[in-house]
Image: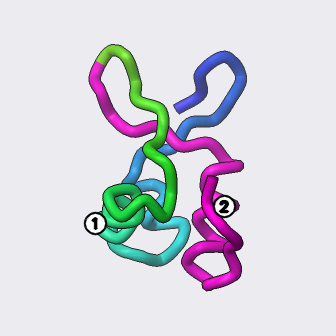
Amino acid sequence: MTVNGTKKYTVQDVADILGVYRGTVINYEKRGIFPDPRRNPINGYREYTEEDIERLKQIVEGKSGPVG
């Protein structure tokens, strides 16, 4: 999905890109490893950007620094 010229990804899209389970991405949010993503105001679905995916990729690969 593209909003205002910016590609938005669902949690399942992100999981597929990173090669992890959807629940893994959600678990990172619940544990505070990754901040809660933006939510679509119409349907409440999580929306991720390419920057979010890059940051999550670093987390999955174990290369992240402190969150915040």
Image position, residue 13 (x, y; %): 45, 55
Amino acid carrying mark 1 in the image: Gly
- On the image, numbered disc 1 is attached to which residue? 23
Amino acid carrying mark 2 in the image: Arg
Magenta extent: 43-68
In magenta segment, residue 13: no
In the foreground, 42 or 30: 30
Image position, residue 39 (x, y; %): 40, 29
Q: How many labels does the image show?
A: 2
Give how far apart the Cα atoms at labels 2 and 1 are: 17 Å
In the foreground, 39 or 36: 36
Q: Is residue 7 left or right of residue 29?
A: right
Q: In this view, does 17 lie to the left or right of 54?
A: left
Q: Is residue 27 above or below residue 46?
A: below
Q: Is residue 50 left or right of residue 21?
A: right
Residue farthest to the bottom, as pictured: 62
Residue at disc 2, secondary structure? helix
- On the image, numbered disc 2 is attached to which residue? 55
Residue at disc 1, secondary structure? helix
Q: Is residue 23 above or below residue 53?
A: below
The residue drawn where x is 55% and y is 78% is 60
